Amino acid sequence: MLMDNVLNEFINGIHMTEDELELRLGCGRSILRPFHDHLVDKHRGVWPDDASDPSIGPPEILVRLTRAQLGTMSNALKDLATGADIEAWEFPVRLGQEPTEALRLAGELDDVIGSLSAQ
């Protein structure tokens, strides 16, 4: 799951201070860890095997997210896709998707956030 990998990079993979993390994502590790764990638990609940083969499970996972969590996800996707911490060639190896896909998903999240703000 892309978001699991992205959040994991910020928690464990990329070395930065807590202040820098909060500046870049809007929250620190104390918020990211439980959020990451929640997403991982939901994913494992649907695909409990290590292979996580989507062809044998349902096509979607239901997760309730706050506006802040959606914003954190969008910020994280955009931040990593810039190539400042992970080069473009390494991005798909570490995260399982191309940077362009991360940016597309970030745009979709921004659209959802925008629609929530309008309500």
Image (cartoon, rainbow, N blue to C red):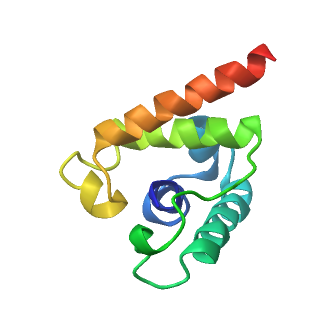
Corner quadrant of residue 42: bottom right
**Residue 10: image x %, image y %?**
51, 55
Given residues 40 and 18, the one toward you in this image is 40
In-image side of 93 versus 66 (left or right): left
Which residue is pictured at 60% across the width and 69% down the height? 40
Residue 26 in sight here: no
Residue 43 in sight here: yes
In-image side of 23 versus 105 (left or right): right
In-image side of 115 versus 25 (left or right): right
Q: Which corner quadrant holds the C terminus?
A: top right
Q: How many marks?
A: 0
In-image side of 89 versus 48 (left or right): left
Q: Which residue lies furthest to the top in this view?
A: 118
Given residues 68 and 110, the one toward you in this image is 110
Given residues 111 and 95, the one toward you in this image is 111
Q: Residue furthest left?
A: 89
Q: Which residue lies furthest to the right in this view?
A: 119
Corner quadrant of residue 22: top right
Which residue is pictured at 18% across the width and 51% down the height? 89
Q: Looking at the picture, does residue 9 appear above or below residue 118?
A: below
Q: Looking at the picture, does residue 43 appear above or below residue 90?
A: below
Which residue is pictured at 51% across the width and 30% down the height? 108
